[in-house]
Amino acid sequence: MTNSNSIVSAVQSASGFAIIELFELELVKGLHYTNEDDAETKVRYRWHNGSSRNDNRRVFFGGNAYDRMPIKAEGFEYNGTQGSSSPRPTLTVSNLFSTITAVLIGVNAVTPGNDLTGAKVTRIRTLARYLDADNFPTDIKTLTKEDGDFLLQESGDKLMAADLRGNPFGTPSANNRFPDEIYYIDRKATETRDFVEFELASLMDLAGVKLPRRQVLPKEFPGVGTFIG
């Protein structure tokens, strides 16, 4: 279960650790790829739009690797002008080397004109103190103890002790994160050589989805059609 209270407490503390924003794009079997696709078919993409100390520029969280990809995400916030409707965010992803175009070509070969409509987009936010230990290399200026457990890391004019075996800012935990924000691609808005922009929607706001999804009958719901004074 997500421990959002721990995240809020850390944000409000004097440590000032940065919020890390991660994205997952998950394709749908039968819509974006077929059962006959080989095991090498990529059905989930994980990205981050930030910096990393790793040579491969990946961020590791919860045992998963997130590749660096220039992304601009807007419109996730709720505001009073929306009434009861959900946000309709936009996700703009770099199309350098036609990376996203290649994904679209593969998807459209399965469902012509789909353009990733219906794909699941999850926005994950956590703090640096909860990232996996793999994010923090040990080949920096250090002095190790004889047992190899600790190092002395230079920070300005001070020396701080940090555990070689883990995150120097805190304890890695995939559970300590803000509540995940889950949306689905409603349509591809723009595709150029530089970027691809998608419009997102909640599951209930997707085009063609209507409520209720099943018939409501008094037999199953006795309160239907009755009034309590």
Image (spheres, rainbow, N blue to C red):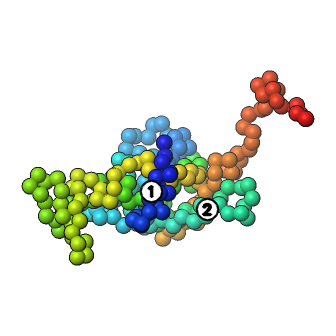
- Residue 40: x and y in percent read 37, 44
Q: Residue at x 33, y 64 (%)?
A: 52
Quadrant showing the C terminus: top right
Q: Earlier in the sequence, mark 2 or mark 1?
A: 2
Q: Is residue 63 visible?
A: yes
| Residue 6 place in picture, x, y as percent | 46, 52
Q: Residues within 10 Å of mark 2 (few under 14, many from 20)?
A: few
> In the rendered image of this protein, does residue 212 appear above or below residue 54?
above
The kind of residue tagged 1 is: Thr
Residue 23 falls left or right of residue 141: right
**For the view shown, which residue lies furthest in the top direction?**
219
Under tag 2, what secondary structure?
loop
- Secondary structure beneath label 1: strand
Provide the residue designation for mark 1.
126
Position of 16 with respect to 105 (left or right) is left
Q: Is residue 193 left or right of residue 85?
A: left
- In this view, 138 is above or below 154: above
Going by the numbered disc 2, the residue's amino acid type is: Glu
Q: CA distance from mark 2 to mark 1?
A: 17 Å
> Residue at horizontal 68%, vertical 51%?
205
Picture coordinates of residue 87, whole percent (x, y):
65, 59
Tell me the tag on residue 77.
2
Q: Residue furthest left?
A: 146
> Residue shown at 68%/47% (left/top)?
204
Nearer to me, 120 or 154:
154
The image shows a total of numbered marks equal to 2
Q: Nearer the viewer, residue 57 or 98?
A: 57
Extreme residue toward the bottom, this view = 157
Indicate the quadrant where residue 199 lies.
bottom right
Residue 151 image position (x, y, % from top left):
18, 60
Direction right: furthest residue:
229
Q: Residue at x 61, y 62 (%)?
A: 77
